[in-house]
Amino acid sequence: MNITKSETESKILRAVRELGSSPLTEAGVVEHIHPLFSRSLDRNQSSDEIYLANHSLGRPLDEIADRVANSLDAWYTDLDGAWDLWLKERDQFRNCVASIAGCSQADAVVPKTSAGQGLRAVINSLPESKPNIVSTRGEFDSLDFILKSYAHKDRATVQWVDANNEGLYQTDQIIASINQETDLVVLSLVCFVTGQLITDIHRVVEAAHQHDALILIDAYHGFGTLPIEFDKLGADFMVAGNYKYTRGGPGACFLIIHPRHLSSDGGVPNPGSLFTTDTGWFAKKDPFAYRRQDTPEYASGGDAWLEATPPAIVYAQANPGLELVDAIGMERVRKYSLEQQQFLVDKLNEVGVQTESIPQHGAFILIPTQNGQEVVTQLKANGVNVDARPCPQSGRWLIRLCPDMLNTQAELIEAAKRVCRVFEELKA
Ligand SMILES: Cc1ncc(COP(=O)(O)O)c(C=O)c1O
């Protein structure tokens, strides 16, 4: 499968072409990109809420409703003929994810319904029946829980790397935990609580490989908000998904396998090699030949990592957001995000709200507080939709605020005033 763009220019591609190729400005984004979100933006008029939880659930484009309806219409009108459209949407999904993640081989992108499902497929591909895994205390709950359940069932040994007193992870400490016994390293590119970006993650990849270990990177808080070069980084696996920065809703996640691990011919793998038991008939060689031999014969390339019948309509839900981000380009998305974040930090600081400064970070800013849940409830009651997470070890709460292309500076100024009012009332 090659990376291709759709032949007819969609509304999204036209809007991005008309936006031009210069760095993003609020005027340009409002004129060209906002009309793609009329339904999401209508809510602003009716609710008076300022949405800054874009790092949690991204806001949907209008096009999603049309594309999903189209996929459903095909079912009503074409019945099993709908599979042609559904699989075309799936291929487009793989193409777009590969392009955004810097992966040269689109079939190396294997759709999953969650990032955790990708992690399980990887653990269940390892030759070792009880692998030694190195990970950090800062992984998202889903991956953290999966690793703990494997350890509890005696199906893995997990060595956990702790954060320092500020809740940050030190690359050297992660590297020092990897040794000859290590089979797999599981590490976030951007930590979900603090937003810490592991800028020298390539050093962890190199260290893992020096010890013949594999490495899986959880890029959920990086994908669609900052440039990622998967091939160049050389990690063995990457998991992420689309309900945050690429506005694709839940269920549209993926695992990427480095092309060097993919076989161009497929066939029956050596039992001691890297192939997953999280599988199903879509991973078979020639699935529609219905051959039943006693040894599993896998498809070639990344298709060997597919599973059973896929949730085919979810790709229509995810593709518009992927197409938008891919067309704008990650460098521009990242630059605009950093400018918006700095603007919000400045406005908060001007009204006396202290923010936590993490020099290299993802797409959200932080406000430390004693009681995250209470503050978030009050902020929502005052029309600022954000969330908060406790640091895994210290329990210290951090409120996460993520402006995105739909937020204007006027909104961010108003949000800062509302946050200040709530903090004064709560003395938080
Ligand atoms: C870093 C990170 N990884 C993974 C996930 C989601 O994991 P899953 O798709 O397994 O629910 C999230 C969700 O917020 C996340 O922040």
Image: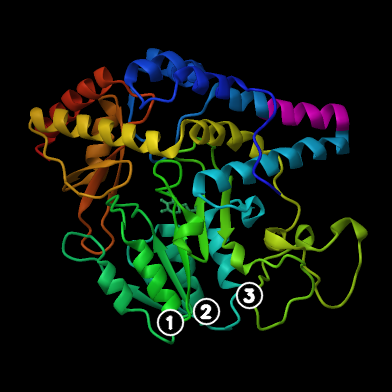
Provide the secondary structure element on which disc 1 rests. Answer: loop
The residue tagged 2 is 153
Residue drawn at x 87%, y 30% as measured from the top left: 78
Q: Secondary structure at mark 2?
A: loop
Local packing at callout 1 (Cα closer than 10 Å; few below 14, some 14-19, many 20+) is: some
Q: Amino acid at mark 2?
A: Lys
> What type is the residue that disc 3 sits on?
Leu
**Disc number at residue 40?**
none
**Residue drawn at point x = 47 percent, y = 31 percent:** 328
In depth, the one of 305 and 310 nearer the eye is 305
Q: Residues within 10 Å of mark 3 (few under 14, many from 20)?
A: some
Q: Which residue is mark 3?
A: 274
Is-magenta flag for residue 258? no
Residue 133 in view, yes or no: no
Which residue is nearer to you in this view: 364 or 268? 268
Read off the magenta span. Answer: 68-78
Q: CA distance from mark 2 to mark 1?
A: 26 Å
Residue 312, position as x, y percentages in the image: 71, 43
* Left or right relative to 245: residue 419: left
Is 426 situated left or right of 235 in this image?
Answer: left
Q: Nearer the viewer, mark 2 or mark 1?
A: 1
Residue 139 horizontal/vertical position (percent): 38, 61
Q: Main secondary structure of the magenta part?
A: helix
Indicate yes or no whether the magenta region holds residue 70.
yes
Q: Which residue is mark 1?
A: 211
Give the percent coordinates (x, y) of residue 176: 30, 78
Which secondary structure lies at badge 3?
loop
In the image, what residue occupies the spot 35% across and 52% down? 192
Whether 162 is drawn above or below 180: the answer is above
Circle 2 packing at 10 Å, graded few (<14), some (14-19), many (20+), is few
